[in-house]
Amino acid sequence: MTVKIHNPRELEEYRSKINSNTKTYERQILVSMGTCGIAAGTTPVLEAIEREVKAKNLQDKVGIVLTGCMGLCHSEPSIEVVECDTGASSFFGNVKPENAEAIVLKGVKVAGVDKIQSTWCFPEDEEYTEGTLQAKLVLRNCGKIDPEKLDDYVRRDGYSALSKVLSSMKPKDVIDVITASGLRGRGGGGFPTGKKWSFAAAQKSDVKYIICNADEGDPGAFMDRAVLEGDPHSVLEAMTIAGYATGATNGVIYVRAEYPLAVKRLLIAIGQSKDLGLLGNGILGTQFNFDIELKYGAGAFVCGEETALIHSIEGLRGEPNFKPPFPAVSGLWKKPTVVNNVETFANVCAIIRNGAEWFRKIGTEKCPGTKVFALAGKISKVGLIEVPMGIKLFDIIYTLGGGCKGGRKFKAVQTGGPSGGCLTSERLETPIEYESLIALGSMMGSGGMIVMDEDDCMVNIAKFFLEFTLDESCGRCTPCRIGNKRLHEMLVEISEGRADVAILSKMKTLCETIKDTALCGLGQTSPNPVLSTMNNYLDEYLMHIKDHHCPAGVCVKLLRFVINEKCVGCTMCAKNCPASCISGERKQKHSIDQTRCIKCGVCYETCKFHAIDKK
């Protein structure tokens, strides 16, 4: 890229030039090329579409755009077809290479392709009508632009917020707007973003840092990855604005090395911004300098905690610090440091462009704006959604998510990942807000939302999340290192039928002790899955303890496979049993020797006559 932007006027001229030189098509085909789409087989679909366009000589009529994730993970490979003259748009899922001809020739009238329900699809970017289920602010460009083309971002008002800040606002003005907007940290804590920036701005220091925490580690969470893969420039622009507001000249994006596509697109975006003069020295002809570099995380969950993250960047062991001092006062290399996550930064440019009052019209008084959630687990429509704060859990799980897979009965939803809690069907009218979820023993977290059905055992779920915490704990403090280990041992006793009722009070006391004494947020919130399942599903714990029975049929030590009257004596279960513990004559009912059964479930999975029960 040879052009260099020297001032805001030249940026607008560059934007006008892009718009005037943009090729006009009759139809555009947007192809989802995020990680989930590629994994689902979008590449051969893209190649087939490109072949059809070329074979039918439609290069001047049909444009192809390689976008980031559209959020439609439940229907990958997914395609959006846009009729350019009317703006009519349709989404199609589960597209196969053989559908390419129909897509290229017929556009929105594609036959044989699953049309995705409009309740899932977003309205146009930065538009919101009260009462709608989704509002596209953070994900405004994801699935709409080619993330590897800076011009696509600039065309959609990219870097106009930075231009506005540098040309007409003082650093304090920027902080005032962010503060007035009520934007709260989307990484889980919900701390006011403007207040954090003001703390850093007030510090006297020759060097300050802006860190983007892209180390999302919650099981089932992939919101930050989608933003980095689909709209990397929005994060770069916001970090630059944060640098101007706080007096920082250095930015660091701490990103997981397990996100290779996000890393690739970030590196491309950083290079493009530097080439255009939107990063580096003298940005837009001012005296403001700001640069951004990447640092790679090795997948440690605890490094999502800001002080542990800072230690990791410094080359130290990823362990948290006692606070205060907070990073805004003494952070990276003991210098004032602002740490915000990807989603928080992705809100900044829209707020600067549209104003604080516009942002406050979305969401609730205490929690303005939107929240991106990754729906996962036993949900029919796995994927990304962006909803106004205050929306009810019911609308997310049933209207947007389509309820549980296969018509199974909803049992629980885990919000906040390993730090959150399980909420029952009685809590589905709960509005999504920081305080309302905390009051129920859960939390917002970074945005993972795992749905469970009747086949899930809540004792096993608590054990699963605690195992994750044990693996990811840095081990620095005794409550987390030893307390959670003892807590896990108690859950194992319950799941194996070796516990008595007294263990429940011991567990509750230990949970409260860990919450009160652990060093960092990871340890302090680690008992939440245990406490919430004990509070909401006590009867299930008592079944394990008193009756030695797991109602979901998950806890192996409490499980028995029994052959019922439907058995026709086909011998398939006996032939496949690895323990050779099934006996019986052909065409006669078989039986299982419970003393030799290893509870593997092969017989249950093999039987075609539903003749084996789990008890």
Image: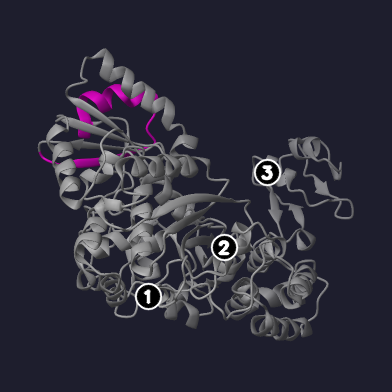
Which amino acid type corresponds to the residue marked 2 in the rendered image?
Answer: Gly
Q: Is residue 251 left or right of residue 514?
A: left
Helix, strand, or loop for circle 3? Answer: helix
Q: Nearer the viewer, mark 3 or mark 2?
A: 2
How crowded is the residue under tag 2: few (<14 C-alpha within 10 Å), some, or many (20+)?
Answer: many
Who is closer to the viewer here, 554 or 137?
137
Rendered residue at 34%/75% (across/down) = 367
**Residue with the mark numbered 3:** 605
Q: Residue furthest left?
A: 85
- Quadrant for the N terminus in the image: top left
**Residue with the mark numbered 2:** 304
Residue 356 place in picture, x, y as percent: 23, 72
**Residue with the mark numbered 1:** 431
Is residue 396 within the magenta segment? no
Residue 232 place in picture, x, y as percent: 38, 48
Rendered residue at 80%/35% (across/down) = 575
Say which label, 1 or 3, has the lower sequence index. Answer: 1
How crowded is the residue under tag 1: few (<14 C-alpha within 10 Å), some, or many (20+)?
Answer: some
Q: Which mark identifies residue 531?
A: none
Residues in magenta? Answer: 86-109
Who is closer to the viewer here, 108 or 565?
108
